[in-house]
Image: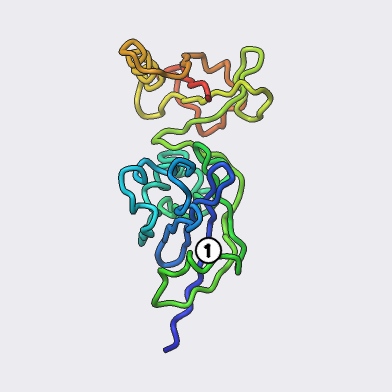
């Protein structure tokens, strides 16, 4: 029986240079873990998600989603204004999460990197779940090198130099995460700063956190500006 042809795109997921999994896009998004990664001794295998520690079979089971990508990857993507901006730039729907991962793949949160796989280079084990179709590999459409931080608000990484936080360029090793005031809710940076300090008082280990003035930021994108009634303070977490 002749199977219908299905065009597929693939991203290779790496942790600290180790191949962890491949996610394939077609009618369904399928995340399959690399057999070599699965076979590694537990004490030498990087933690992709805490689920793999709780469920011994987690890495052996492909994760299949019809529209969005599996939550373990979806949770790494921006939400709110930053996702809308990304979708607008790429001219696709905000729920097209595979393309967002491809676009932001070199700068996802943490040590995870998603690299596009050239057509014809996807291994057979990453295609085994497509039983009713004949996969036709194509190059990833939206691969690029942009930044991403997970969460419902826009955040930025910055370099601190001479008292100023540079969003538009990396000019020092003193790196910080910046959370700007909300265009909808008042006092978000102050609220988060307070929560962090309360956690510290309760005995939790937290990164260094500060409130700063907007005038100390360099290179803030235009879409992040708000009216004068909003908070003028930002909360920053030191990157560790």
Q: Quadrant of residue 190?
A: top left
Q: Nearer the viewer, residue 175 or 216?
A: 175
Residue farthest along the right direction in this orientation:
171
Quadrant containing the N terminus is bottom left
Count all numbered tags in the image, as a single digit.
1
In this rendering, position of residue 101 left or right of residue 139: left
Q: Residue at x 35, y 22 (%)?
A: 186
Q: Residue at x 49, y 73 (%)?
A: 135
Q: Nearer the viewer, residue 128 or 193?
A: 128
Q: Is residue 104 visible?
A: no
Residue farthest along the bottom direction in this orientation:
1
Applied colour scheme: rainbow
Q: Nearer the viewer, residue 219 or 240?
A: 240
Residue farthest along the top direction in this orientation:
201
Q: Residue at x 39, y 53 (%)?
A: 59
Reply above or below: 61 against 46.
below
Q: Residues within 10 Å of mark 1 (few under 14, many from 20)?
A: many
Reply above or below: 34 against 127.
above
Q: Give the percent coordinates (x, y) of residue 160.
A: 61, 19
Q: Is residue 110 visible?
A: yes
Reply above or below: 77 against 215.
below
Q: Nearer the viewer, residue 49 or 98?
A: 49
Q: Give the percent coordinates (x, y) of residue 197.
A: 37, 13
Q: Residue at x 40, y 43 (%)?
A: 49
Residue pointed to by mark 1:
9
Reply above or below: 96 against 9.
above
Q: Give the percent coordinates (x, y) of residue 34.
A: 49, 57
| SS type, badge 1 | strand
Q: Give the percent coordinates (x, y) of residue 211.
A: 47, 14
Q: Quadrant of residue 222?
A: top right
């Amino acid at each position: 029986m002749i199977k219908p042809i299905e065009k597929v795109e693939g991203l290779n997921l790496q942790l600290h240079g180790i191949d962890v999994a491949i996610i394939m896009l077609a009618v369904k998004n399928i995340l399959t873990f690399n057999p070599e990664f699965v076979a590694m001794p537990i004490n030498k295998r990087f933690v992709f998600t805490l689920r793999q520690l709780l469920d011994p079979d987690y890495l052996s089971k492909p994760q299949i989603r019809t529209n969005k990508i599996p939550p373990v990857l979806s949770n790494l993507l921006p939400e709110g204004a930053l996702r809308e901006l990304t979708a607008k730039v790429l001219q696709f729907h905000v729920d097209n999460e595979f393309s967002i991962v491809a676009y932001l793949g070199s700068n996802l949160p943490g040590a995870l990197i998603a690299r596009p796989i050239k057509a014809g280079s996807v291994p057979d084990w990453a295609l085994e779940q497509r039983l009713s179709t004949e996969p036709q590999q194509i190059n990833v459409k939206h691969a690029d090198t942009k930044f991403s931080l997970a969460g419902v608000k826009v955040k930025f990484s910055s370099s601190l130099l001479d008292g100023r936080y540079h969003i538009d360029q990396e000019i020092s090793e003193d790196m910080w995460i910046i959370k700007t005031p909300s265009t909808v809710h008042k006092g978000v940076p102050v609220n988060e700063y307070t929560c962090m300090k309360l956690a510290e008082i309760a005995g939790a280990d937290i990164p260094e956190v500060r409130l700063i003035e907007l005038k100390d930021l360099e290179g803030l994108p235009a879409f992040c500006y708000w009216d004068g009634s909003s908070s003028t303070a930002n909360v920053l977490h030191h990157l560790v």
